[in-house]
Image (tube, rainbow, N blue to C red):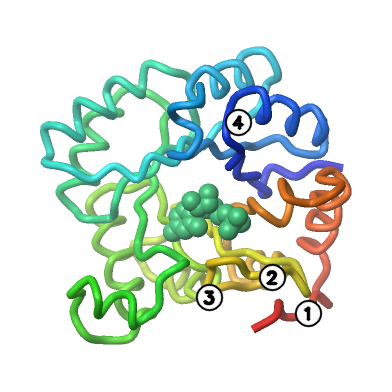
């Protein structure tokens, strides 16, 4: 059983560990996320190998943020690789520049709203304006989508609100911060179960530690795949 709606975050230190994990997961996982932690450990080479030799889909989680010209140049370079999703911060000037850089390719630009590991106290510490996180995420999602983003990254707790936005029609909602029932939250704060995320209109869930830290990653992935289609799934530990 596999399901492209599950994206596994390959947050392992290097290419060899990444290849071993993908070997263990085998045909149960079709879509992988490669992020900043793996970049200096051969992450781009691994992305290419998984795509071209194993037929996997690839999400490159770079969370780019810079002046427009720099973002455009960075995305133009990344677009030369045959990848599927790329993240940038959801500020409209960043999204517009990223879309320019990706013009003429199939790369989907996903806009990060507010990290799922942050709560209101964290935003205060970063001098981000008052208001509930939910309202801020919804506003950032709307402006990023209006600026041309192909989708947004948000917490599954905000998915239903984003899905209801007119700007979100035909756009992707991708959610980290997903925890199977009873799983350790780690540093994630705004979480939901796989079943809740899917029920709230999410297109893809991103799951890292509950799979790659499991004693049996393939069994962990398969349990999550089963939860994705189970309306009875319970809430994760709060
Ligand atoms: O291990 P865990 O399931 O928490 O991993 C979540 C992954 O999603 C990590 O790779 C993290 O960098 C990424 N992510 C996130 N929150 C965002 C965007 C990406 O947790 N807003």
Identify the element where label 3 is drawn: helix
Identify the element where label 1 is drawn: loop
Q: Is residue 135 left or right of residue 55?
A: left
Please tell me which residue is depicted at 21% across the width and 85% down the height of the picture.
130
Distance from the alpha carbon under mark 4 to that under mark 3: 25 Å
Which mark sits nearer the N-terminus, 4 or 2?
Answer: 4
Identify the element where label 2 is drawn: loop
Please tell me which residue is depicted at 55% across the width and 24% down the height of the picture.
47
Few, some or many residues within 10 Å of mark 2 (<14, 14–19, 20+): many
Q: Are marks 2 and 1 in contact (CB under 8 Å)?
A: yes
In the picture of the structure, the residue carrying the numbered disc 4 is 57
Identify the element where label 4 is drawn: strand
Q: Are marks 2 and 3 in contact (CB under 8 Å)?
A: no
Q: Are marks 4 and 2 in contact (CB under 8 Å)?
A: no
- Locate residue 32: give its quadrant: top right
In the picture of the structure, the residue carrying the numbered disc 3 is 157
Q: Is residue 126 left or right of residue 120?
A: left
In the picture of the structure, the residue carrying the numbered disc 2 is 193
Distance from the alpha carbon under mark 2 to that under mark 3: 10 Å
Distance from the alpha carbon under mark 1 to that under mark 4: 29 Å
Which mark sits nearer the N-terminus, 1 or 4?
Answer: 4
Provide residue 125's location: percent of width, then percent of height.
25, 76
Please tell me which residue is depicted at 58% across the width and 72% down the height of the picture.
191
Q: Is residue 187 above or below residue 76?
A: below
* Label annotation for residue 234: 1
């Amino acid at each position: 059983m596999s399901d492209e709606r599950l994206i596994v975050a390959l947050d392992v230190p290097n290419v060899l560990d990444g290849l071993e994990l993908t070997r263990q997961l085998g045909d149960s996982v079709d879509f992988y996320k490669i992020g900043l932690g793996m970049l200096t450990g051969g992450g781009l080479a691994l992305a290419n190998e998984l795509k071209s030799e194993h037929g996997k889909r690839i999400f490159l989680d770079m969370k780019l943020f810079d002046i427009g010209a720099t973002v455009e140049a960075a995305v133009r370079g990344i677009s030369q690789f045959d990848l599927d999703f790329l993240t940038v911060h959801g500020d409209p000037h960043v999204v517009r520049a990223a879309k320019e850089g990706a013009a003429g390719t199939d790369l989907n630009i996903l806009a990060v709203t507010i990290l799922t590991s942050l709560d209101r106290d964290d935003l205060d510490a970063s001098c981000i304006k008052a208001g509930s996180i939910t309202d801020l995420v919804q506003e950032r999602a709307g402006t990023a989508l209006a600026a041309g983003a192909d989708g947004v990254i948000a917490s599954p707790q905000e998915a239903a609100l984003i899905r209801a936005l007119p700007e979100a029609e035909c756009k992707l909602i991708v959610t980290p911060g997903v925890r199977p029932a009873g799983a350790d939250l780690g540093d994630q704060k705004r979480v939901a179960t796989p079943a809740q995320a899917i029920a709230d209109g999410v297109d893809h869930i991103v799951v890292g530690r509950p799979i790659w830290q499991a004693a049996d990653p393939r069994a962990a992935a398969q349990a999550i795949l089963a939860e994705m289609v189970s309306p009875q799934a319970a809430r994760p530990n709060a």
